[in-house]
Image (spheres, rainbow, N blue to C red):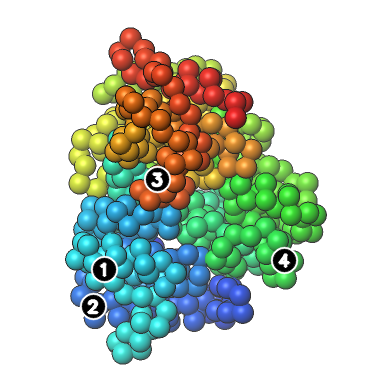
């Protein structure tokens, strides 16, 4: 049986380059050996708390040093990391804890209110990162090394709603994540140990976790953490720390441009990594070279670890495309309307993007039907529409699913709609994404008022804040007498998007 662990990424650095700076956060600087020692001590504490191989441990923390230390501690103890999105409401965190079967929540003091309330409601023990976890680690016997896991054992469960409105846990294996980090570091990109990356992307997100953390450390490079993104602070850190690689979403690039003159061009081979674009043809994972160097756009999803394609110099690059598949990954276009089987299309045809390879997830936790819909004939059906030309360049044209990507975060309309339908003054609602200069897309709710009701747009937005995560609630509310319906009585969201695009 082949064995592998995500913890190897850190353990091997501690063995090969123990005195190299691994992590910078403010005045804190830790070498690879120091981070690994801290992780092993906390892994011992987790074992003392009853965490056994295969147990799920939820992790709720911003981009502070506590996140990677706890992340690798969980992996070293043989546990499965369940990252918790920091913008979720208490009820949404409760769902993640219940659905994942988490036995423990490690929560940063900044998220203690929401995290502890959700843990109490679900009967899950909560331990505060920082002083409490440190004390437990000091009193425990550190693990001598990481526990062995089968390569296909679960390593991380990312929660993603899909179009069902119910968040599902996408199960990623140690093999998925180690391979994606390795291929990102050495094939898609050329990360070197002397590189210094600024990690401003949230590490609870697949993009930040794989590209900022695991890929950077897979190459033995240094990660500089920015706990809360601020453009001026990011520019200051780039200059101070000699950063030559930046990981961010388009919203961050807009803010950096607005903050004034950018940092000096980074020395080669560094680049600017971006993702989370909501527009058709935009890259969701990619590299934007600084100092007039090439732009590398790409594409990925939580279910694909996440990187699936990227513009790569070996194949040539083409702006506006998502490039070619990663090493060891196949990406094709299939007939979108055909269910139950994958029927591949010839070059130039528009269809659904399908992916197979070492990056494709094991399935959705406890949801065999959803897994069977997503994994068909050995391919993962992405729900995104695209094309592939004669030279193999892929392009995302639209999304089969109506996912809204706001500031790099996925927002699932049905989930928002189900919450808004609980509002007493709402009879019907359709949630759509509208183009937004800052966030890529903005969440818009088109509401048909209940009979006799005169709802107020600002009031609905305010009410939504108490029931939805901060990235999900509608900032824009429009009213209509009725919603446009197609022959199958489904709301024609494309008509609503056309109606409200450009109108304020």
Residue 111 on image: x %, y %: 41, 66
Residue 220 on image: x %, y %: 56, 67
Up the image or down, 107 lies above or below 271; here it is below
**Badge 1: few (under 14), some or many (20 or more) residues near its Cα, within 10 Å?**
many
Of 182 and 466, which appears nearest the observer? 466
Residue position marked by numbered label 4 in the rendering: 236
Between the residue at mark 4 and the residue at mark 2, the CA separation in whole angstroms equals: 41 Å
Q: Which mark is residue 452?
A: none
Residue position marked by numbered label 1 in the rendering: 104
Residue position marked by numbered label 3 in the rendering: 463
Residue 464 on image: x %, y %: 40, 44
Q: Earlier in the sequence, mark 3 or mark 2?
A: 2
Callout 2: helix, strand or loop? loop
Between the residue at mark 1 and the residue at mark 3, the CA separation in whole angstroms equals: 31 Å
Q: Earlier in the sequence, mark 4 or mark 1?
A: 1
Residue position marked by numbered label 2 in the rendering: 49
Which residue: 54% across, 56% down?
A: 201
Of all residues, the one furthest to the front in this rendering is 452
């Amino acid at each position: 049986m082949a064995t592998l662990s995500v913890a190897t990424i850190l353990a091997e650095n501690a063995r090969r380059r123990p005195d190299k700076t691994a992590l910078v956060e403010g005045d804190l600087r830790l070498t690879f050996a120091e981070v690994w020692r801290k992780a092993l001590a906390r892994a011992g504490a987790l074992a003392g708390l009853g965490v056994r191989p295969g147990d799920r441990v939820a992790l709720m923390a911003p981009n502070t040093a506590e996140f990677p230390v706890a992340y690798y501690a969980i992996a070293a103890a043989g546990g499965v990391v369940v990252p918790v999105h920091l913008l979720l409401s208490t009820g949404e965190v409760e769902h993640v804890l219940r659905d994942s079967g988490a036995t423990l929540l490690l929560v940063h003091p900044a998220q203690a209110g929401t995290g502890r309330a959700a843990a109490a409601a679900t009967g899950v023990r909560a331990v505060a990162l920082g002083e409490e976890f440190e004390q437990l680690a000091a009193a425990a016997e550190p693990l001598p090394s990481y526990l062995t896991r089968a390569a296909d054992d679960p390593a991380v469960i990312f929660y993603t709603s899909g179009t069902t409105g119910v968040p599902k846990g996408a199960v990623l294996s140690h093999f998925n994540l180690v391979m994606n980090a390795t291929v990102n570091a050495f094939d898609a990109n050329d990360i070197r140990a002397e590189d210094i990356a600024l990690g401003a992307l949230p590490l609870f997100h697949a993009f930040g976790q794989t590209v900022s953390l695991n890929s950077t450390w897979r190459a033995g490079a240094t990660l500089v953490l920015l706990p809360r993104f601020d453009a001026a602070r990011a520019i200051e850190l780039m200059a101070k720390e000699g950063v030559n690689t930046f990981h961010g979403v388009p919203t961050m690039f807009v803010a950096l441009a607005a903050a004034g003159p950018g940092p000096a061009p980074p020395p080669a081979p560094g680049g600017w990594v971006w993702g989370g674009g909501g527009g058709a043809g935009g890259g969701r994972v990619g590299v934007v070279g600084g100092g007039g160097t090439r732009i590398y756009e790409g594409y990925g999803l939580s279910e694909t670890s996440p990187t699936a394609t990227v513009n790569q110099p070996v194949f040539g690059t083409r702006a506006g495309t998502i490039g070619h598949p990663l090493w060891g990954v196949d990406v094709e276009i299939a007939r979108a309307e055909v269910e139950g089987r994958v029927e591949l299309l010839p070059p130039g045809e528009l269809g659904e993007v399908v992916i197979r390879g070492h990056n494709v997830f094991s399935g959705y936790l406890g949801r065999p039907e959803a897994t069977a819909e997503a994994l068909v004939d050995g391919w993962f059906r992405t729900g995104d529409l695209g094309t592939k030309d004669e030279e193999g360049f892929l392009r995302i044209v639209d999304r089969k699913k109506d996912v809204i990507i706001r500031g790099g975060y996925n927002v699932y309309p049905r989930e928002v709609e189900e919450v808004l339908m609980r509002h007493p003054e709402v009879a019907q609602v359709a949630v759509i994404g509208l183009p937004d200069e800052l966030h890529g897309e903005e969440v818009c709710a088109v509401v048909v008022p209940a009979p006799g009701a005169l709802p107020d747009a600002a009031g609905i937005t305010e009410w939504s804040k108490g029931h939805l995560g901060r990235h999900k609630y509608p900032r824009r509310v429009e009213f209509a007498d009725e919603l446009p319906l197609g022959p199958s009585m489904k709301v024609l969201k494309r008509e609503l998007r056309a109606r409200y695009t450009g109108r304020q």
